């Protein structure tokens, strides 16, 4: 069989369309895959497109037709005694039955290869063929079910009766009630197998299933009752009873590792039923030592709450726990199917939660791993790098501006100093000139004082010229320099305060703190307060400048008032 499939699968591959290629891959899983792969394929059929389903159905029908011809692998009925062949044929017929649709020939093909009149060990092939038809959930198939209703094996007969009971057959419903409540374990087990495929919405049947679950015997009855429970329609009023039974089983047998397989089935059932009441139970299983339990609990929690809400609940449980427990919760998050939603939810919580949230989210995100988590961490690191670069650039600009202000202040100081030096040198030159004149006229300096006194008028004129052309410009330069420096000091102070507020706000966000409207108002008020203080300082500087009382100028005016009597005396004529 394997060789024939390989030859079929490899021929004409380049001309196949995408749906045909996908159908071929699924068919190969049915033919040669392990049980886990086949179960995964069964779940994938729920999401397969109509084109893929049609191609897969045609591929299965062609294979069955070829292998049942003389010389084929299924031509001899006795070959079904081979467990591997029996399993493969059962899966082929089951999937073919599931793919039944109005107007196609899947039902007739299934009935042809799973004829209830066939002799030999065909009961499991017939059971799975009928199960596929039952899963198709088509109505009007009472005639097909009646063909198997008198089958000699319980598993086939009770499945057919379950299909009839679901269609409203009261006699078949009563037979199911009787079989599931009997003391005959084989008959009861067969009824539970039927409920695993075609669960009947009946209070007595569901109540009996819940009783078997609560007994919790380590038997096939309990295992199949657990599987039957999660096939109750979640919109049914009976779904809450089934969910409570599953919750009780999980909590009761949590400390017994021998029941882990059954406990995993119960957790899976809680997810299929979408039982909101199961949330605490599911969260409690996320730190279990058995990875299978963790996986089923995590995925069921995701099914019940949705990916984003499930991540939030896990985070709430992880807060305050030690690092090892947090890593255990991270392992649980890693089992969720929607890994992108996990990474997104954690990254959002990192910037909207408290500092404790941020630390826990960072550990969870780093432990979850994967491309999505790595991308979120890289984005956060890039954001921090950009922020640090912005801080450095702003600091450099402020330092440059401050250095420029110092340079301008030094230039103004040098200008005033140069003017003072020039005045000193002029005065000194005048004194030396008067001495030289005295020496030339009298040959000695005895009359120098008289000449100096006689030049008092000239000194007065020079003083006036000094005041007009030296003192006034110098005073204006000093006042302008002082005013400019004062303005720049005010501006630098405001810029520094604005930068600190902006720095605090950005770090406030990056540290994962929730920004409320009150926080925004607080930051805005701080900026407005700094701006108002700067404006008031500038207005005060302008007022002082207009009044001539700012800084050094005010001090110079005071010194000039103190020297005024001396200057007046120097201007008075000297009596002989």
Image (cartoon, grey):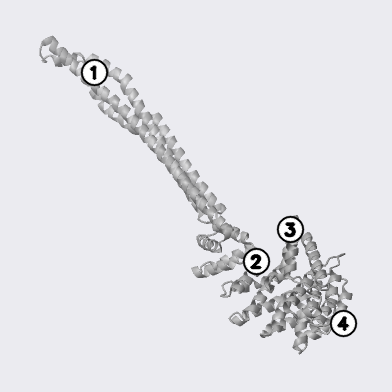
Front of the two marks 3 and 2: 3
The label number, if any, that marks residue 571 in the structure image? 1
Q: Are marks 2 and 1 in contact (CB under 8 Å)?
A: no
Q: Earlier in the sequence, mark 1 or mark 4?
A: 4
Q: Are marks 2 and 4 in contact (CB under 8 Å)?
A: no
Q: Which residue is mark 3?
A: 13
Q: Is residue 488 visible?
A: yes
| Residue to which mark 2 is pinned | 302
Give the number of the mark in front: 3 or 4. 3
Decide: is 457 above or below 253.
above
Q: Quadrant of residue 269?
A: bottom right
Q: Considering only order in the chain, which callout, 1 or 3, is on the residue closer to the N terminus?
A: 3
Question: Where is mark 4, residue-wise?
Answer: 171
Q: Earlier in the sequence, mark 2 or mark 4?
A: 4
Which tag is nearer the camera, tag 3 or tag 1? Answer: 3
Question: Residue 166 location, x and y as percent?
Answer: 83, 75
Q: CA distance from mark 3 to mark 2?
A: 39 Å
| Label 3 vs 2, first from the N-terminus | 3
Name the residue nearer the viewer: 498 or 21. 21
Residue 223 x %, y %:
69, 80
Q: Residue at x 60, y 58 (%)?
A: 344
Asked whether, in this view, residue 531 is left or right of residue 479, the answer is: right
The answer to which of 36 and 3 lies nearer the viewer is 3
Per the model, the C-alpha gap separating discs 2 and 1 is 102 Å
Position of 131 relative to 360 (above/below): below
Q: Residues within 10 Å of mark 2 (few under 14, many from 20)?
A: many
Disc 2 on helix, strand or loop?
A: helix
Split into 4 quadrants, where in the image is the N terminus? bottom right
Outermost residue, top side: 441
Q: Which mark is residue 330?
A: none
Q: Is residue 539 above or below residue 358?
A: above
Mark-to-mark CA distance, 3 and 1: 119 Å
């Amino acid at each position: 069989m394997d060789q024939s499939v390989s030859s079929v699968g490899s021929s004409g591959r380049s001309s196949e369309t995408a749906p045909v290629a996908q159908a071929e891959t699924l068919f190969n899983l049915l033919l040669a895959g392990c049980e886990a792969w086949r179960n995964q394929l069964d779940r994938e059929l729920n999401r397969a497109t109509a084109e893929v389903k049609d191609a897969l159905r045609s591929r299965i029908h062609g294979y069955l037709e070829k292998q049942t011809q003389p010389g084929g692998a299924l031509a001899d009925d006795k070959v079904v005694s081979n467990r591997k062949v029996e399993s493969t044929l059962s899966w082929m017929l089951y999937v073919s039955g599931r793919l039944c649709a109005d107007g196609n020939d899947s039902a007739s093909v299934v009935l042809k290869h799973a004829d209830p009149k066939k002799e030999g060990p065909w009961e499991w092939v017939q059971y799975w063929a009928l199960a596929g038809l039952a899963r198709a959930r088509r109505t009007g198939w009472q005639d097909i079910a009646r063909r198997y209703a008198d089958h000699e094996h319980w598993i086939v007969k009770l499945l057919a009766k379950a299909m009839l009971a679901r269609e409203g057959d009261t006699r078949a419903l009563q037979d199911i009630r009787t079989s599931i409540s009997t003391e005959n374990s084989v008959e009861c087990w067969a009824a539970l197998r039927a409920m695993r495929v075609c669960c009947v919405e009946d209070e007595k049947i569901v109540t009996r299933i819940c009783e078997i679950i609560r007994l919790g015997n380590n038997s096939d009855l309990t295992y199949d009752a657990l599987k039957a429970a999660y096939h109750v329609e979640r919109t049914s009023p009976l779904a809450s009873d089934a969910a409570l039974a599953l919750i009780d089983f999980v909590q009761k047998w949590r400390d017994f590792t021998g029941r882990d397989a059954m406990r995993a089935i119960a957790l899976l059932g809680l997810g299929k039923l979408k039982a909101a009441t199961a949330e605490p139970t599911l969260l409690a299983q996320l730190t279990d030592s058995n990875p299978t339990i963790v996986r089923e609990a995590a995925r069921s929690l995701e099914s019940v709450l949705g990916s984003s809400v499930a991540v939030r609940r896990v985070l709430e449980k992880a807060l305050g726990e030690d690092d090892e427990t947090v890593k255990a919760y991270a392992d649980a998050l890693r089992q969720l199917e929607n890994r992108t939603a996990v990474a997104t939810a954690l990254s959002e919580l990192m910037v909207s939660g408290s500092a404790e949230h941020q630390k826990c989210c960072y550990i969870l995100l780093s432990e979850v791993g994967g491309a999505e988590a790595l991308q979120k961490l890289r984005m956060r690191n890039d954001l921090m790098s950009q922020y640090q670069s912005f801080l450095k650039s702003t600091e450099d600009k402020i330092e440059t501006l401050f250095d420029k202000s110092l340079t301008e202040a030094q230039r103004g100081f040098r200008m005033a100093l140069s003017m003072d030096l020039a005045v000193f040198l002029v005065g000194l030159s005048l004194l030396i000139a008067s001495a030289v004149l005295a020496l030339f006229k009298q040959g000695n300096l005895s009359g120098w004082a008289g000449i100096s006194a006689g030049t008092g008028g000239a000194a007065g004129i020079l003083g006036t010229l000094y005041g007009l052309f030296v003192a006034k410009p110098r005073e204006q330069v000093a006042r302008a320099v002082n005013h400019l420096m004062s303005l720049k000091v005010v501006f630098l102070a405001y810029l520094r305060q604005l930068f600190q507020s902006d720095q605090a706000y950005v770090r406030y966000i990056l540290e994962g703190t929730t920004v409320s409207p009150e926080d925004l108002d607080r930051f805005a008020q701080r900026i407005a307060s700094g701006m108002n203080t700067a404006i008031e300082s500038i207005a005060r500087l302008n007022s002082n400048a207009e009044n001539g009382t700012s800084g050094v100028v005010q001090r110079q005016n005071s010194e000039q008032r103190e020297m005024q009597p001396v200057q007046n005396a120097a201007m008075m004529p000297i009596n002989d």
